[in-house]
Image (tube, coloured by chain):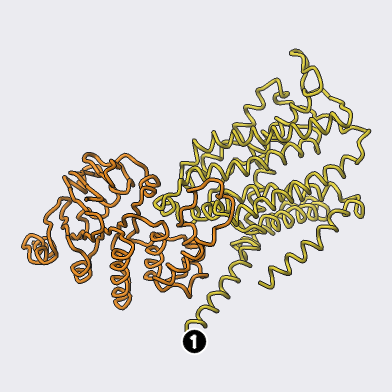
Chain colours: A yellow, B orange
């Protein structure tokens, strides 16, 4: 109980600090923006990967889909659309502030909706598979999506496309604007997921993780729950993708949108490091991994990947359930001791 | 009235005939037992009834509805639940959560994203007290002993307010003092809540005391049926058990 209260106090203290952070440390705004992005990635992965026990290697697909859908809407909403013979990758759209923000909002939401539809279609097909079979099946998703995107001229094919330039007449600078956008997204994602995990829906996901046969035999339509969970993840992930496309300013199917080896793997590693299946685990994991990555990159250039790998190995060996998984385990251990004391009385 | 009617059900796995021409009826509100040597097809019959696998031939009616082509969750929702021989519980969740999730969660889609209602919590506490696990309600279900997990699984099934329970060896692995309590509770559930029970059991003392009618399976076919006393004295049943 006490740890809970302390944690909540910390959060209320932390929120105002976070809000003024970009003003205090302007040099670190982009770094902090990426931490919010990572938190969203880790949280959304954990919905299926941790809480439901279904390891997915294909969530990056939704990230990329959100990125592309949003970019296309931003490009075409206030312009006449593209000429068939134009080189799409070289189109740079300039919008005024109101056009930019309206198209960004519409694009991000549309990206989310498209990702949800995709998650429902894909999920209904492959979420009937159990455990490892599902994991193997998702391995190809990101790759397939990248290949498909590389073949569509409308979105610049293999050369990618450029997201609209950030308007010069906007009230906030680009970095600060996206800092707050991703801070809000991470916050909303966290609050929504917290509510979900406390609800009947969240418990159903846990039940599927612990014993899917039992859940089924108790009348829970497990596949529907898994699909719903994946869709919720896909929605937030796609919105994150839409934003990241704009922060980077350039979308490429293999390196950025469907970047399996970077974003796609990080989201899994972060959730596992922090403690999969816990609410705070992915948040902590995202901060730890991304900050260490930056620190190692700054001070140990050349050896940074080695250091990062070493850190992951150490955490996995000594805290196999992740940082927060370890905390939860201690709590449960204390409960058991308490109940044994209760028994002997 | 017969709550469950199984008509000449057959199921084979490749060349192995697990059930052949098995028929039984379970009247509303009764306790019926199934006995038989190991490998005689008792659990296969349970699996057929609850929709775990498709049956090769035959018909199964529950509450006058043909259920042999329905999926597991659908049959469970009709009010027929089974417990497993090896305990199936949600090991990494506390006992209370195990109970909560066993309530009728998506009866109402609007409440699916809200926490559990007070009634569910109260019912969970009440049933945990009923099986004697109230003190351990905040422990992880996986940390309970095997016998306690069986009790928990039984309580979880009661959360769903079923019409009928299929119990697969409810006393196997439970210590002898707990067994007596368990029999009392099974009887109590049958009498007070009017839940019909179909019980697979190896413990003859238990099943002879509990059941009003007993079916004996051997080698995948129905060998004998009758009142406990008749079954006890049936030469074919004795032979089947002693391997003659």
Residue A203: name its quadrant: bottom right
Location of residue B101 in the rendering, given as x and y in whole percent from the top left corner: 49, 57
Label 1: how many residues lie within 10 Å, few (<14), some (14-19) or many (20+)?
few
> Would residue B13 appear left or right of A225 to someone viewing this image?
left
In the figure, B102 relative to A69: above or below?
Answer: below
Give the chain of mark 1.
Answer: A
Q: Nearer the viewer, residue A227 or A269?
A: A227
Secondary structure of the residue carrying numbered label 1: loop
Q: Is residue A308 above or below residue B8?
A: below
Closer to the camera, B215 or B28? B28
How many marks overall? 1
Q: Which residue bears the numbered disc 1?
A: A345
**Left or right side of B64 for A37:** right
Q: Considering only vertical position in the picture, is B218 above or below A58? A: below
Q: Residue furthest left?
A: B235
Q: Relative to the observer, which residue lies in front, A314 or B219? A: B219
């Amino acid at each position: 109980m006490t740890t809970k209260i302390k944690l909540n106090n910390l959060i209320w203290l932390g929120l105002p600090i976070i809000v003024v952070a970009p003003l205090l440390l302007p040099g670190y705004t982009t770094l902090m923006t990426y931490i919010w992005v990572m938190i969203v990635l880790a949280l959304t992965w954990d919905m299926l990967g941790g809480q439901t026990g279904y390891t997915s290697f294909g969530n990056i697909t939704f990230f990329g889909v959100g990125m592309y859908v949003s970019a296309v809407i931003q490009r075409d909403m206030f312009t006449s659309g593209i000429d068939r013979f134009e080189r799409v990758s070289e189109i740079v759209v300039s919008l005024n502030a109101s056009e930019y923000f309206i198209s960004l909002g519409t694009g991000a939401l549309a990206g989310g909706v498209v990702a949800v539809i995709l998650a429902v279609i894909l999920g209904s097909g492959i979420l009937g598979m159990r455990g490892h079979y599902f994991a193997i099946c998702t391995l190809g998703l990101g790759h397939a999506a990248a290949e498909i995107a590389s073949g569509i001229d409308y979105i610049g094919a293999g050369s990618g496309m450029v997201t609209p330039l950030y308007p010069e007449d906007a009230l906030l600078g680009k970095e600060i604007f996206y800092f707050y956008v991703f801070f809000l997204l991470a916050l909303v994602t966290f609050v929504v997921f917290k509510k979900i995990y406390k609800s009947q829906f969240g418990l159903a996901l846990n039940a599927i993780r612990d014993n899917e046969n039992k859940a089924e035999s108790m009348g829970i339509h497990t596949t529907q729950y898994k699909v719903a969970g994946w869709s919720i993840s896909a929605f937030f992930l796609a919105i994150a993708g839409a934003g990241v496309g704009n922060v980077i300013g350039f979308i490429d199917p293999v390196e950025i949108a469907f970047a399996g080896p970077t974003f796609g793997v990080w989201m899994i590693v972060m959730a596992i490091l922090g403690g999969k299946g816990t609410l705070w685990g992915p948040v902590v994991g995202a901060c730890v991994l991304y900050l260490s990555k930056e620190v190692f990159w700054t001070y140990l250039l050349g050896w940074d990947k080695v250091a990062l790998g070493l850190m992951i190995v150490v955490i996995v060996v000594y805290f196999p359930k992740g940082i927060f998984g370890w905390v939860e385990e201690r709590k449960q251990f204390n409960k058991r001791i308490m109940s044994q004391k209760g028994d002997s009385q | 009235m017969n709550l469950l009617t199984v008509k000449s059900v057959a199921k084979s796995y490749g060349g192995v005939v697990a059930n052949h021409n098995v028929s039984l009826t379970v009247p509303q509100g009764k306790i019926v037992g199934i006995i038989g040597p190991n490998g005689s097809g008792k659990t296969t019959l349970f699996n057929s009834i609850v929709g775990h696998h498709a049956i090769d031939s035959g018909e199964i009616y529950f509450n006058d509805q043909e259920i042999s082509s329905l999926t597991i969750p659908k049959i469970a929702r009709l009010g027929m639940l089974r417990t497993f021989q090896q305990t199936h519980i949600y090991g990494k969740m506390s006992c209370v959560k195990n109970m909560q999730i066993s309530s009728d969660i998506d009866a109402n889609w609007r409440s699916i994203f809200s926490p559990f209602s007070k009634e569910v919590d109260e019912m969970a506490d009440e049933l945990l007290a009923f099986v004697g696990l109230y003190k351990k309600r905040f422990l992880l279900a996986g940390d309970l002993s095997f016998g306690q997990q069986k009790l928990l699984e039984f309580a979880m099934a009661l959360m769903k307010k079923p019409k009928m329970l299929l119990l697969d060896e409810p006393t196997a692995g439970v210590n002898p003092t707990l067994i007596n309590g368990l029999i009392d509770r099974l009887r109590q559930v049958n009498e007070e809540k009017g839940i019909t029970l179909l019980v697979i059991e190896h413990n003859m003392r238990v099943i002879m005391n509990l059941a009003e009618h007993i079916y004996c399976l051997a080698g995948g076919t129905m060998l004998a049926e009758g009142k406990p006393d008749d079954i006890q004295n049936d030469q074919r049943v004795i032979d089947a058990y002693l391997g003659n």
